[in-house]
Image: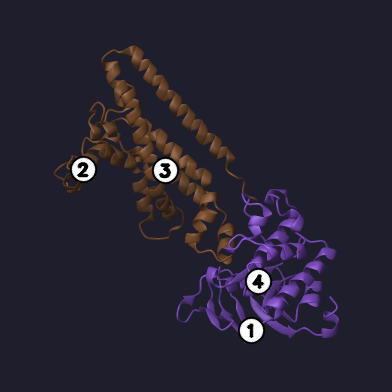
Amino acid sequence: MYEALLISLQLALVTSVILLVLALPLAWLLAFGAFRGRTLLEVVVALPLVLPPTVLGYFVLLLIAPDSMAGRLWQSWFDTSLAFSFPGMVIASLLYSLPFAVQPMQQALRAIPESWLEMARTQGLDTLRMLPRLILPAARNGILVAATLSFAHTMGEFGVVLMVGGSIPGETKVASIALFELVEMQHFDEAWRLALILLAISFVMLSLVYALNRRTPAVPG
Amino acid sequence: MMNHIRITGGPVSLRLDVVASFGRDARIVVSGHNGAGKTTLLRVLAGLTGAEGGIVINGSTWLDSDSGFSMPPEKRGLGCVWADTALLPWLNVRDNIVFGSGHVGGRHLKALATSLEVDMLMRREPAMLSGGEAQRVALARALFRQPDILLLDEPFSAQAPALRRRLRRALKNLQRQWMIPLIMVSHDADDARQLADVHWHMREGRLLASVDGGMPERKEQI
């Protein structure tokens, strides 16, 4: 049981850290970009919100199956299968939690007043130098919310990780699947404990999100 | 070296028609009614608003719409003050002043802060400043980077009259020392009288008159 919890925590941590890096340029593009296909990109990013997790899992499984291009490449580099492995679950989780990372970042970037961006440019900063000195500090809370939500959402995955990971004990069996199996085997004591732990983690994560959202600095008029 | 601007057309809402030349250390005060295009003219000069025409400052081309060239604002060496002071709330006054300059301060910062009367505010958060204080901090930020041109949109509007006089003097001293052009939008007749050596008047986007300031002996008194 604790083994499964540890795998869940690892998966959530790895996923949210990678998403921090991946989601920021995407959020930037969606917040400030004016290009054809912007709406399409926005829809694709948001798809995991409404798609049944098993559907997403099925497509990811096809993508990383041993006879797929990615699967073969992985096999030749690392000599293991990508499907039914921890890295395979990470890929699925990245897609599954993508909107939870992109959308708060996108909102935070859009909330930066135009006058601040113009001020920075007239003070001689190009976009790249604006990033550490203006954009990241101004959007800091939104970025932290993005990380927290991705973590919590990945902790709660079920269908996607079952499809892609296959619930191999000690490797790809995560807490939510372990809970299902405990109930199935009528081990209610353990199920009760695991459910409480997962509830507590979600509660703490969401409290953090709401505290961060409230602390978002007021923009002076 | 003379500076040249020829701006025809600006944003859709307001067609600019401004043709002017001015010296390398000209002090220009721009007046006109609300909506005459004064702020838009400054924004076009800063590169924040697109326009047709050509701008050549200090021998380098900033805008040449015929060839589709517009130098980005961050390369123009600007010192700007806008109506929105845009002080960053997570930085104290000192860090706001050095924002974007790439160097951290020292003697130059101290002298500047004293002359603009913000030296007592350096550790304060922007939220604790009055409107006039915030405006002086924004002016200090624009001047600290030793710009190649000053574009100021009513930079003293929130200051008390006595303080305005001292700020005008400080601004003029720096502008003379650096030999850079100063273009300032103002409704205040005293700004024009005490600061300007050229006076531009605008109406409905057009530069109507460019008048060289008279009475030099009187101007020297400030």
Looking at the picture, how far across and down is residue A105, in whole percent?
A: 46, 47
Q: Are marks 4 and 2 in contact (CB under 8 Å)?
A: no
Would residue B30 be found to the left or right of residue A34 on screen? right
Q: Is residue B81 visible?
A: no
Nearest to viewer (mark 1 / mark 2): 2
Q: CA distance from mark 2 to mark 3?
A: 23 Å
Q: CA distance from mark 4 to mark 2?
A: 57 Å
Chain in brown on the image: A
**What is the C-alpha distance between the residues marked 3 and 1?**
51 Å
- Residue type indicated by callout 1: Ala
* Alpha-carbon span between mark 3 and mark 4: 40 Å
Q: Which mark is residue A64?
A: 2
Q: Secondary structure at mark 2?
A: helix
Q: Do dots 4 and 2 share one subunit?
A: no
Q: Residue furthest front?
A: B107
Which residue position is annotated with label 3? A101
Q: Single out the mark in the foreground, 4 or 1.
A: 4
Q: Closer to us: mark 3 or mark 1?
A: 3
Secondary structure of the residue carrying tag 3 is helix
The quadrant holding residue B15 is bottom right
Q: Amino acid at mark 4?
A: Leu
Ranked by sequence position, the earlier of labels 4 and 1 is: 1
Q: Chain of mark 4?
A: B
Query: Is residue A162 left or right of A153 when viewed as pictured?
Result: left
* Residue at the image point whose x is 70% and y is 51% from the top: B123
Q: Residues within 10 Å of mark 3 (few under 14, many from 20)?
A: many
Q: Which residue is located at x 41 percent, y 41 percent?
A: A100
Marks 4 and 1 sit apart, C-alpha to C-alpha, by 16 Å
Looking at the image, the residue that sits furthest to the bottom is: B1
- Left or right: B44, with A74 as reference point: right
Chain B, chosen colour in render: purple
